[in-house]
Image (cartoon, rainbow, N blue to C red):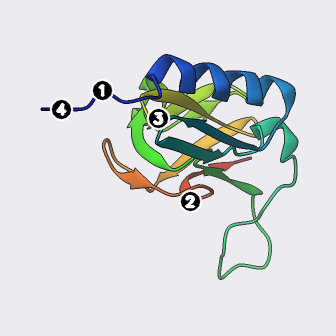
Amino acid sequence: MTRMSDLSLEEIRHALTTARRLGISEVRLSKGEETFRARLAPDWEEEPELTEAPSSQTAGPLRKAVTAPVVGYFRPGPQWILEGDVEQGKPLAEVTALGLSNEVRSAMKGRLVELLAEDGDPVEYGQILGWVEE
């Protein structure tokens, strides 16, 4: 006999959406014998710092890493598949975790120059998925 989960996907989704909207970074839900915990990543807008990619050159175009917002599975969007120009804040891809899609966005306007993740790859929070160059 299979046991029905005490926590429904809808309850988890609602808790995560509410926490993100209120700026809460950790969620813990308990119902019956079930416990769910999650740590939410900060929104892409809260990480304005620019990071240069490792390079043998001392000067060159500014590069910003495109990182995974949560732990999950990578799914490219149409703009990710076609390397090229991107707008700041425009969704490039998504990371799916617990049935929830989390958009991967560019923190700066530029050109998508390097892709490090492929469709279905498991990714960690903060993992570099690609690079956008000024």
The amino acid type found where label 1 is placed reads Met
The location of residue 118, given as percent across then percent down, is 34, 48
Q: SS for tag 4?
A: loop
As measured in the structure, the alpha-carbon distance from the residue carrying label 1 to the one carrying label 4 is 7 Å
| Label 3 vs label 2, nearer the camera | 2
The location of residue 84, given as percent across then percent down, is 53, 35
Q: Residue at x 61, y 51 (%)?
A: 67
Q: SS for tag 3?
A: helix
Please indicate whether residue 54 sits to the left or right of residue 12 in the image.
right
Q: Which mark is residue 4?
A: 1
Instruction: Say which residue label 2 marks.
Output: 127
Residue 48 vs 80, above or below: the answer is below
Who comes first in sequence, dot 4 or dot 3?
Answer: 4
Q: Are marks 1 and 4 in contact (CB under 8 Å)?
A: yes
| Label 2 vs label 4, nearer the camera | 4
Q: Residue at x 66, y 25 (%)?
A: 15
